[in-house]
Image (spheres, rainbow, N blue to C red):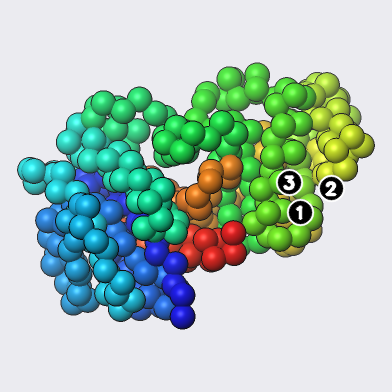
Amino acid sequence: MFLPRIGITMGDAAGIGPEIVLKSLADKNILKVCQPIIIGDSANLRRTHRNLGFDFELITVKKDEEIPLNKEKVIIYDLENIAEEIRSGEESAVSGKASAEYIEEAVRLWKEKKIDAIATAPISKMAIHLGGYDYPGHTEFLAFLTGTKEFAMSFFAERLRVVLLSTHVSLRAAIELVKKEKLVELIKFSHQEISRLLKRNARIAVAGLNPHASEGGMFGSEEEAEILPAIKECREKLGIDVTGAYSPDTIFLRAFKGEFDAVVSCYHDQATIAVKCLSFGASVNVTLGLPLVRTSVDHGTAFDIAGKNLAESSSMTAAIKLAAELSVSS
């Protein structure tokens, strides 16, 4: 039986990345749906493996060596890029640079058809900056590496799927980005990508920006001036099944219950608060628009608990399983 080969980047070595990756791969069900290949530093991973008390076997393959076809073992694709022992919980140029190199190598392996999809453990934006990489996060870095011009951050949380108009910007800046032209492009893009992944004509809902979607203009003008005209254009000119603007305090729950296939959200926390309240630990970050399948966890590096065997791995497990599922269906 064909099993997709999922490249799993281990994330920042000073955070919980190595821990949650190994905890996920201790679940034998993972080996039933994919061939996991951890892209990271073998010495760090094996030390973590010992500290966690795991007994499942790890096979180390050096960079540029042939990756074996072994469906019953976890493979480490070793970049040997952490020469010194990393202190858990501390951001550093060494761990930041190494975590960025895992992402670069994962994309290279995908381009060479040695892996089928990527699942990423969390990185530190500050650490990769210290390491010489100037990207606000995975999404923008992967878009650069794959030459992708149109992309979007989304989260899949069981039946709730959200696509974000803006990501890591201030709330003031996010409000300024709620413009008709940007919304038309995002609605069109979201419909295209979600329909492709689900293999059906996706039903898209759009969240309002203001309380109660402004209640007919009582609490703000953005719905009337920007959001509703964008929805109208997408429906009437592009034939997209899109409706809104809906009150943001109810639309995510409605989508979670299956009324819509995806919700276009006006800003980062509007979407992620809903996702994490409804499905924390089971939700997965999916980058739409990339030529490859990329999934990730719904949380960060958690430096405060790194190295303490306290990290919950359910989101990493969900990310690996979703990468396998999407790589087979795409």
Q: Do the residues labelled 1 and 3 touch (CB within 8 Å)?
A: yes
Mark 1, residue position: 202
- Residue 18 visible? The answer is no
Residue 297 in picture, x, y percent from top left = 44, 52
Question: Horizontally, is 243 left or right of 257 in the view?
Answer: right
Give the total number of marks visible in the rendering.
3
- Element on which disc 3 rests: helix
Image coords of residue 150 (percent x, y):
60, 34
Q: Mark 2 points at which residue?
A: 241
* Residue at 71% across, 60% down: 199
**Residue that mark 3 sits on:** 191
Image coords of residue 5 (percent x, y): 40, 64
User: How far from the left and from the top, in percent, is residue 19?
Assistant: 26, 59
Q: Nearer the viewer, residue 243 or 111?
A: 111
Instruction: Give the amino acid at mark 1.
Output: Ala
Residue at left 48%, top 65%?
A: 324
The disc, 3 or 2, on the residue closer to the chain's N-terminal end is 3
* CB under 8 Å between discs 2 and 1: yes
Query: Circle 1 sits in a helix, a strand or a loop, which is it?
Result: loop
Question: Would you call the spot at circle 2 few (<14 residues within 10 Å), some (14-19), or many (20 or more)?
Answer: some
Q: Which amino acid does label 3 sit on?
A: His
Asked if disc 3 and disc 2 are in contact, CB closer than 8 Å, the reply is: yes
For label 1, the crowd category at 10 Å Cα-Cα, with few meaning under 14, some 14 to 19 and many 20 or more, is: many
User: Which mark is on residue 314?
Assistant: none
